Amino acid sequence: MNKNQFLNSVNIEDKNLISNIYNKIQIAENTNKIIYTNDFLPPAIWNQVSTICKNYGVELFTNGVFKDADRRMLSFSSEGEPTIYPINLLKISNKSKFSKVDHKDYLGSIMSLGIKREKLGDLIIQGSTCYAPVCNDISNYIIDNLNKIKNCPCEVSQYDYTLNEIPERKFLEKIVISTSFRLDSMVSAVCNISRSNSVQLISSGKILINYFQCEKKDKVINNNDILTIRGYGKFMVADIIGSTQKGRLKVIIKQYI
């Protein structure tokens, strides 16, 4: 498979990113060395690349530190899975006893340092502490320069996840009632808003499915799809558990917290 075939076989708009991945696969294949991406990529990318790698003499491995992480660093190797990745896990502690900060506050404060989202993995919040996997080449910069989350003072340190217990993601689980698995119906149910308001969110580009913007209101949502709804949060569509007497679907939704 040549480069053009590779680019056309991955259904991702960012062809520069896919081209960079192709180049890393070629380097890994030609040098027999382990080659890593310089960022964390969502499932829509690494799932597709994993399938395509079977055409090459290398395997794709991924690591996002956390169990079932969405955003992961990719590695390409012909010698088996690497034991160490160029990833540091940062522990960011909110030192204010009076103000709470949430996921978007931590993410926004880190990105305000000029750091791209792709340089960060999933963020897990536990109480007043955020755990953030980052590419190791920027970890010291964040430690030295991140002093506040929102208006709250914070302390940043490196957390050795190879020796200490790895934090686990927590969800807020709830049951919603939806007329169908169409995107506009699911957004309406998840956000508890009218169908017309959900269509407005979709048409204004505020809905991501598996981290990619979707403006098709009739897009069918599948189990384990991840909906990011700007202004409302991030949700996983977990399972159908039944239906109401009127034939509407009872759906388990897991909200990321």
Image (cartoon, rainbow, N blue to C red):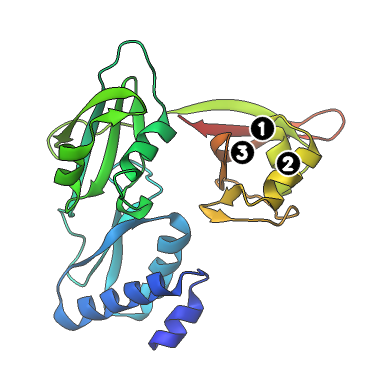
Q: Earlier in the sequence, mark 3 or mark 2?
A: 2
Picture coordinates of residue 183 (x, y %)? 70, 48
Picture quadrant where residue 2 is located:
bottom left
**Residue type (three-letter) at the residue carrying disc 1:** Cys
Disc 2 residue crowd, few under 14, some 14–19, many 20+, Cα 10 Å = many
The residue that mark 1 highlights is 191
Up the image or down, 81 lies above or below 132; here it is: below
Mark identifier at residue 198: 2
Picture coordinates of residue 63 (x, y %)? 28, 52
- How far is disc 3 from disc 2 in space, using C-alphas? 21 Å
Picture quadrant where residue 7 is located:
bottom left
- How far is disc 3 from disc 1 in space, using C-alphas? 17 Å
Horizontal arrangement in the rendering, residue 216 relative to residue 23 (left or right): right
Mark identifier at residue 239: 3
**Residue type (three-letter) at the residue carrying disc 2:** Ser
Image quadrant in which the C terminus is located: top left
Picture coordinates of residue 133 (x, y %)? 26, 43
Horizontal arrangement in the rendering, residue 39 relative to residue 142 (left or right): right
Q: Are marks 2 and 1 in contact (CB under 8 Å)?
A: yes
Image quadrant in which the N terminus is located: bottom left
- How far is disc 2 from disc 1 in space, using C-alphas? 8 Å
Tell me what residue is drawn at x 20 percent, y 65 percent. 80
Up the image or down, 114 lies above or below 254; here it is: below
Tell me what residue is drawn at x 31 percent, y 41 percent. 110
